[in-house]
Image (cartoon, grey):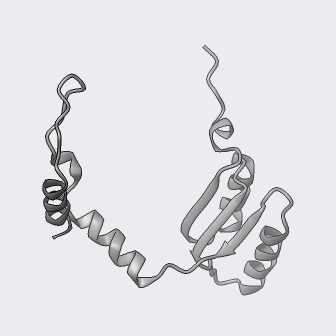
Amino acid sequence: MIRPHVRDFTRGASLYCTLEPCNWCFKQLIQAGIVEIYYEEPYQSRNKEFDLYWRGIMESNDSIREFRQIRISPEAVDMVVGVLQGSSMRSMPATSPEEPDQLDPETLKLILEQTRS
């Protein structure tokens, strides 16, 4: 059996990360075929000149279509943290395709409110 190469799965993908990739990570992302990189916080080593040099290379690399810093709103962070801290919808009873369970809108609304609190 021929196993696919990792790059086959990541070619053309976008990466969203909290920290800007360092130079070593950037090289790995290029080899993986990542074409867009979005990060929240800039990478800052003790060598500022080296950081600026690599940032220039990353921003001008031909294989990267988009390389930029993004800001995440406090509302978005609160929403994600709330979802992660809440219960999951996996606690809902399973239904059978042969016997579809009709969930009325009011019951669904109640379940969603309980998962948010």
Outermost residue on the top side: it is: 1
Placement of the N terminus among the 4 image quadrants: top right
Give me the residue at 62% from left, 72% from top: 20
Residue 116 coordinates in the image, percent (x, y):
20, 67
Placement of the C terminus among the 4 image quadrants: bottom left
Q: Nearer the viewer, residue 9 or 80?
A: 80
85 relative to 88, above or below: below
Q: Nearer the viewer, residue 85 or 114?
A: 114
Q: Nearer the viewer, residue 108 or 115?
A: 108
Q: Quadrant of residue 100?
A: top left
Left or right, residue 83 beside residue 114? right
Give me the residue at 69% from left, 74% from top: 68
Residue 74 coordinates in the image, percent (x, y):
41, 84
Left or right, residue 27 beside residue 56? left
How many labels were placed on the picture?
0
Residue 89 coordinates in the image, percent (x, y):
22, 51
Give me the residue at 69% from left, 47% from top: 32
Give me the residue at 18% from left, 33% from top: 95
Residue 41 coordinates in the image, percent (x, y):
57, 79
Q: Quadrant of residue 84?
A: bottom left
Left or right, residue 72 beside residue 86? right
Q: Quadrant of residue 48?
A: bottom right
10 relative to 63, above or below: above
48 relative to 62, above or below: below
